[in-house]
Amino acid sequence: MRFWRDPDGPEVDWILDHEGAYLPIEVKLTDRPTERDARHVMVFLKEHKMKQGFVVCTTPRPVRLNASVTAMPWHGLPEIVSEMTRKRR
C-alpha cells in the first residue's frame, strides 16, 4: 500500500500495489459520493494510463461515479483487494 501525490497537488490516499499493478483508492467520509470525490483518482488514472479506481466511503451500496470510478462501502474493501489479486494470477 502506498500514498500518491502529484507535483501539482492532487493526492490519492491509498495505492494498492500487487505485482506491479496499481489500484487507486480514495477514502471519503460520505454516504452520498459524487464524481467530485473521485477527481484525484481520475488524475492518477490519466497519468498512469489506467482504467479503474475506487472511492471507499460510507455509502450503503456500490455507486458508479463515472466510467472509471466506483464508490464502495467500507465493508467492500476486502472484495476490491481480492478481485485485484485474482486478476493478476
Image (cartoon, helix red, strand yellow):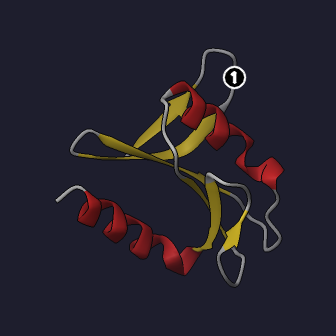
What residue do we see at 48% from left, 29% from top? 48
In this rendering, the answer to whether 88 lies above or below 73 is: above
Please identify the residue farthest to the left as the structure is shown: 89
Element on which disc 1 rests:
loop
What residue do we see at 40% from left, 74% from top? 78
Q: Residues within 10 Å of mark 1 (few under 14, many from 20)?
A: few
Looking at the figure, which quarter contains the C terminus? bottom left
Q: Mark 1 = which residue?
A: 9
Q: Position of residue 41 (x, y in %)?
A: 62, 42
Q: Position of residue 86 (x, y in %)?
A: 25, 66
* 25 lies left or right of 10: left
Q: Position of residue 66 (x, y in %)?
A: 72, 55
Front position in the image: 46 or 10: 46
Front position in the image: 25 or 67: 67
Q: Position of residue 76 (x, y in %)?
A: 51, 77
In this rendering, the answer to whether 62 lies above or below 86 is: below
Count of marks placed on residues: 1
> What amino acid type is highlighted by mark number 1?
Gly
**Quarter of image, res 11:** top right
